[in-house]
Structures are given as structure tokens and as C-alpha cells.
Image: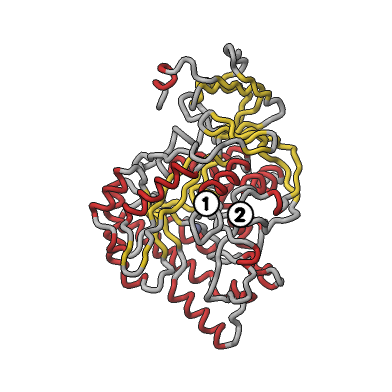
Amino acid sequence: MDINALAVEPSSKELLIAGGEVAGPDGIRRADIRILGEFIAEVAPGLRPGRNARVIDASDRLILPGGIDPHTHLTPPFVDDLTSGSAAALVGGITTLGTFSYPASSGDERESLVESLVRMEEMVHREAIADIFLHPVLWPPSSASSGQLEAIRAAGQLSIKFFMLRRDFGATVSDLLGVMDAARDLGMVVLIHCEDDALLRLAAARLQAEGKSSLRYYAESRPVVSEVSATQQAVAFCEATGAPTYVVHLSSARALRACRNPDTRGLPLFVETRPIYLHLTEERYANVDGPLYVGQPPLRGPDDLEALWDGLTDGSIDVLATDHAPWTREQKLDPALDIENLRPGVNNLQVMLPMYFSEGVRMGRITVERFVETTSTNPARIFGLFPRKGVIQEGAYADVAVWDPSLKKTIRGSDMYSKAGFSIYEGWEVTGWPVLTIRRGEIVFEDEELKGVPGSGKLLRRDPWKPM
Ligand SMILES: [Zn+2]
């Protein structure tokens, strides 16, 4: 708790959010929120504003903790940076972003994990408006000496990501298990992209032999069995090492069953899914604009879509994250692309929460409590930010989104803050939108206008992972 900061700063600017319904993972209650400086000072009914306080009338409004999206791509080749990505997030009710630091290479020179982290930290200080935390990307696993892992821990960025779809993945498993073993002792979360490269290659080779290399066949080129096999292996790594393991963008019912069954109970295993799998299914690839929907893994069938909604409802899926990975429409529809030469990913930061609210909460599929848990509280817990973030309570950072649960808007590509400049959800009618966003006590979005400035976002230091 940073409660002492309140005591030493009695003259901090006061904001009072009055008359709203405050939602958390444990319920909804009518309460006012007093914000002093960067922090929440009080949450209670009937608070009286101090002198010079700004009062925000929140009658008929729902007050949610700022969203935390732990999975975004905001560096080249993707078209957003930390500024445009932050803008899209804040307008969409998200105040905190997890993003990746990729070691850059030129010729034979390759940055170390720590060098890439330092470079990204500088970028955060210059560009970010949302608060940021970083996941160093690990490749090859032998590059992570224990000294490197300890330096990452000391920098307060306690996670690491690797991709099972790398061509030489099989040859590196022993090194990787060594890293996971160390990660457990250091309290670092291991993020894993679960698709089995050998099975992907088999499927692609068959399609190529039949002359089916266009993106019409994208779903067949990355079959569910590839995700299932890799997910089973990730679960085994988790069990063998005890490292906190986070499966990113899980897309299918079968992969979810691999994570959640009697044998996996008690493992420090976390599951994330992303919006495209909740709203869209694989027949999109048959359309002329099918390549717009290409992500890894691909869209799946209607039974998978239902299973993921069920998983978010019943707690078997922990987090909904965007995997925001934006390209322009022209880049996505480039005729040179095929099943082996891809631009995977979509722009999703601005509309993830409103669509989840509209299709989930308004349609009666999930409760507001589960909405908050899967988009704020759980990511805060898993990534070492709780209770500074992920909850509206005394002493927490004042990260708050004021929602109008009845506001109807149609998604328009032209309204996007992402430099993608379009949305795959163009024309969708969505009910329930944030109307005001506060990040660490500062109003950063209000009256349909972005107010936060680049450089005001903060690089967050995280606590080591501990059992929940
Ligand atoms: Zn990703």
C-alpha cells in the first residue's frame, strides 16, 4: 500500500466521483470515490467533497477498475507505438498495458534480454500514456543466463515469453525447462504461445501439395490438434517445473480441456483468451476480406466460441486480453500473403471491453463481477500488480473507468485511435461504453476526447508471483 503518499501530500488535487455503482470482483455497491493525487483515498457512500475538489456526477454510471491488458504488441513491424496504443486503450477503458520487449538483432549482433528491456524502458518514458509493464521475449532459451534472469527480476519485470511455434523449438526444450526452473525460484511468470510447429508444418505441406496455399485455407493450415499438442506440453512443463505458466490466446475447447481437468488442479497454470475467438468463427476466411481476420491461432468453430464464453464465466479462463497486433487494411490484404507468409494479428484495444460488456454482460452471459475479474483483477494478481491495480479500494492507484452502461455506439474504423485505421468489427452495434477514464488520478479521457499526454504513463515495477 502506498497510503503514506496520501499523508505527505495533503494538498493533492481531489477528484470526487459521486453517485455511481462501484463494481469489483466481489460485487457492486453504491459508493462515492475520493481520489487524492494518484491514489484512491476513500470509497464510501455520502462522501463530502473537500475544498477545490472536482466532483464528477456518476449517477446512472457504473464505475469499474481500469482495465489491465497484459498482451499487446506496440513495436514494429506492428503499426502502433506506445502512444497510439495507449490512446486506444484509455478511450476503451483500459489504463494498464503489458507489452513485449523483443531483443533486436542486426547481422550477427543481438541485444541481450536486459539491453532490450532498457531500450523499451526508455521508450515507455517518452511515449506511453497508459501505464506499462514488460515481458522480455526469450529466444533462444540458452540466451537467458541466470544473471540475465536476475537482472530482469531486479528491473521489476517479472515475466518472460516464448513461442512454441519456432522451427527449432524441439531442440531447445531442455534449455527452456532450465529457464522455467529458475523462473519458479525468481517468482517470474512464463508466458507461452502454444502451437506445435511440426504439426503446423505437416498441415501446411498437405495444403501446399493440393495447391491450397491461399489464406482461404488459413484455419485448416493451423489445426486444433497443433494447439492441443502444444498446450498439453506447456501443462507438462508447468507441472514438472512448478513455474507459474500463462497460456496466451487460447482458442479452442480442446485446448481448454487440456488446461482444466482433474490432473491439472492445483497447478500454477493460467489461461488467457482473446476477443476474436468470442465474436467470430472460421468461415470468415472464405470471404474476400478473410485475410483481415488472420491471427495465430486462427478463428475456430461455433462450439469453441461457446466453450470460451463458458470458460470466462466459470473461471476456467482467467484473463481476456487483446493480443492487440495492428496492421493496416492494405497490409492485411496484401495479395503476396499466404498460409506460410503471414501478417497475423488485429487491432482490438479500443473496443475489447465495450464489446465484452455488450455481448457478455448485457446479453446475460457473464456478470459484471466476472467482467471485472477477467479484465482487471486477475491480470493484476497474476502479473504482480495487485492490490495497487485491479481493484477500487482505499490505497490503490486511482485507475477508474466511468461507464455509461446504456450508451449505444456503432464501431467505425474512422473512430479508431490505432494507426491500423480500421476495425474488423466495423458496423457492430455496441451498448455500454466508458465515458471517462482516470489513470493514476489523472483524467485521461473525457467528453469523447483523449486528454493524457505521451510520457505521462509510468513503467510499473511488479511484485514476484506468489500463490493466490
Ligand atoms: Zn501476441
Q: Position of residue 223 (x, y in %)?
A: 54, 72
Q: Amino acid at mark 1?
A: Asp
Tell me the number on the disc at residue 322.
Answer: none
Q: Residue at x 29, y 43 (%)?
A: 154
Q: Which residue is mark 2?
A: 419
Residue 210, placed above or below residue 189: below
- Few, some or many C-alpha atoms within 10 Å of disc 1 (few <14, some 14-19, many ≥20)? many
Q: Which residue is mark 1?
A: 81
Helix, strand or loop at mark 2: loop
In the foreground, 211 or 450:
450
Determine if residue 263 is in view: no
Residue 467, placed above or below residue 231: above
Q: Residue at x 67, y 48 (%)?
A: 355
On-image quarter of the C terminus: top left
Q: Quadrant of residue 23?
A: top right
Residue 33, placed above or below residue 184: above
Q: Position of residue 202 (x, y in %)?
A: 48, 80
Determine if residue 168 is in view: yes
Q: Position of residue 256 (x, y in %)?
A: 51, 59
Q: Amino acid at mark 2?
A: Lys
Asked whether the residues under the numbered discs 2 and 1 touch, taking CB atoms below 8 Å apart as contact, a structural biologist would say: yes
Q: Quadrant of residue 45?
A: top right
Q: Does the beta carbon at disc 2 come under 8 Å from ligand 1?
A: no
On-image quarter of the N terminus: top left
In the foreground, 77 or 36:
77
Q: Position of residue 151 (x, y in %)?
A: 28, 48
**Apparent side of residue 350 relative to residue 146 in the rendered image (left or right):** right
